[in-house]
């Protein structure tokens, strides 16, 4: 039996020891370590072992296509294109899956960090996309210090704003607001856009890997972004959800972090 002891001071000054059987906890920890090691191996297999044969497929297809250049008709050329595209897509899906599996394992360790720094990093990275789409991005509210993994939090914010930029309505420049609110000791961030929106009955599945609502012809993507966001938020003991009134009604993404990850000193943006 594994035991953990606690000493209780009694009123009469005597001390009393209590013992709790922690065999179950120890087992659970071992189990967790084992599954982490397995996941690590699995990611390695994806990123190295499986990518290589996939690259063989796409490069030999390309060589074959070039060799046959003059001898094939348009339909056959199209078949080549589909095959090569498929291999490339599979490669980006595998890389996205690898990214997803790494959350909580290979990111920067948790530390106290000013949330405006995270926001600046994300916005800096998205600068070209913001300019290209003529978007207005406004930031407001409370931006406290967070106990967080810096690169994971930056990616979370970047993914949410990136989606708001990408899923904008035709003929309507994206207007994105990012607000922070200190509430109930915790902190809530909200990213709002005026884009194409989501039908309420579709919302649940979007946080799962590879789930998308749109054809790749219209919007590029692998469908891993929001699953990644959810995993990052859960790694920070928080919650994430989406509210949308439906098609063309824009989206509001909420992230809530619990009190123990927030430092009270408030900085207003
Ligand atoms: N801001 C948004 N407005 C409308 N739809 C969105 C928004 N963000 C995400 N979605 C929908 O959720 C799906 C999943 O998003 P995500 O996981 O980031 O994958 P990706 O962007 O690669 O498609 C998107 O394909 C899109 O259909
Ligand atoms: Mg995305």
Image: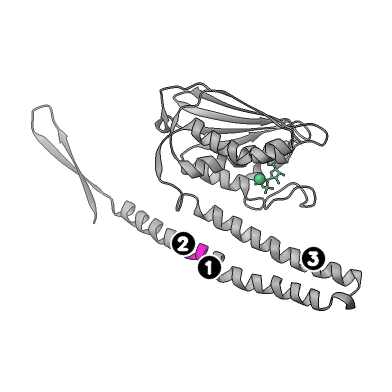
Binning the other alpha carbons within 10 Å of mark 1 as few (below 14), some (14 to 19) or many (20 upward) gives: few
Depth check: 143 or 3 in front?
143
Decide: is 254 above or below 55: above
Q: Residue at x 50, y 54 (%)?
A: 102
Q: Where residue 139 sits in the image (x, y, percent)?
A: 60, 26
**Does residue 257 appear anywhere in the picture?**
no
Q: Where residue 269 sits in the image (x, y, percent)?
A: 53, 23
Binning the other alpha carbons within 10 Å of mark 2 as few (below 14), some (14 to 19) or many (20 upward) gives: some
For the stretch drawn in magenta, the main secondary structure is helix
Q: Which mark is residue 45?
A: 1
Q: CA distance from mark 3 to mark 2?
A: 32 Å
Binning the other alpha carbons within 10 Å of mark 3 as few (below 14), some (14 to 19) or many (20 upward) gives: few
Q: Residue at x 55, y 34 (%)?
A: 120
188 left or right, relative to 220: left
Does label 3 or label 2 sit earlier along the sequence? 2
Q: Kindly indicate whether the residue at mark 1 contacts the one at mark 2 (C-beta within 8 angstroms).
A: no
Depth check: 139 or 213 in front?
139
The residue stretch that appears in magenta: 40-44
Q: CA distance from mark 3 to mark 1?
A: 26 Å
Q: Kindly indicate whether the residue at mark 2 contacts the one at mark 3 (C-beta within 8 angstroms).
A: no
Question: Would you name the residue on which mark 3 appears?
Answer: 82
Decide: is 239 above or below 57: above
Q: Where residue 104 sits in the image (x, y, percent)?
A: 46, 49
Question: Would you name the residue on which mark 2 appears?
Answer: 40
51 left or right, relative to 112: right
> Is residue 42 located in the magenta-colored stretch of the structure?
yes
Does label 2 or label 1 sit earlier along the sequence? 2
Q: How many badges with numbers are in the image?
A: 3
């Amino acid at each position: 039996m594994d035991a953990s002891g606690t000493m209780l001071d009694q009123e009469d000054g005597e001390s009393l020891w209590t013992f709790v059987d922690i065999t179950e906890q120890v087992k659970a920890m071992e189990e967790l370590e084992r599954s982490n090691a397995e996941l690590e191996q699995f990611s390695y297999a994806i990123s190295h072992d499986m990518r290589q044969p996939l690259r063989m497929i796409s490069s030999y297809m390309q060589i074959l296509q070039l060799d046959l250049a003059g001898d094939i008709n348009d339909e056959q050329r199209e078949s080549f294109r589909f095959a090569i595209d498929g291999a490339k897509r599979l490669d980006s899906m595998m890389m996205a899956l690898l990214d997803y599996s790494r959350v909580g394992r290979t990111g920067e360790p948790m530390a106290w960090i000013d949330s405006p720094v995270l926001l600046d990093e994300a916005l800096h990275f998205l600068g070209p996309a913001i300019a290209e789409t003529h978007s207005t991005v406004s930031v407001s509210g409370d931006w406290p210090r967070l106990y967080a993994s810096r690169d994971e939090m930056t990616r979370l914010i970047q993914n949410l704003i990136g989606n708001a930029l990408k899923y904008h309505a035709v003929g309507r420049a994206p207007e994105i607001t990012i607000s922070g609110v200190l509430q109930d000791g915790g902190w809530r961030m909200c990213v709002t856009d005026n884009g194409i929106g989501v039908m309420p009955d579709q919302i649940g599945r979007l946080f799962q890997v590879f789930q998308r609502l749109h054809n790749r012809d219209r919007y590029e993507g692998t469908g891993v972004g929001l699953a990644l966001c959810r995993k990052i938020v859960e790694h920070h003991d928080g919650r994430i959800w989406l509210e949308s009134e439906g098609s063309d009604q824009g989206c509001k993404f909420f992230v809530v972090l619990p009190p123990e990850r927030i430092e009270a000193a408030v900085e207003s943006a």
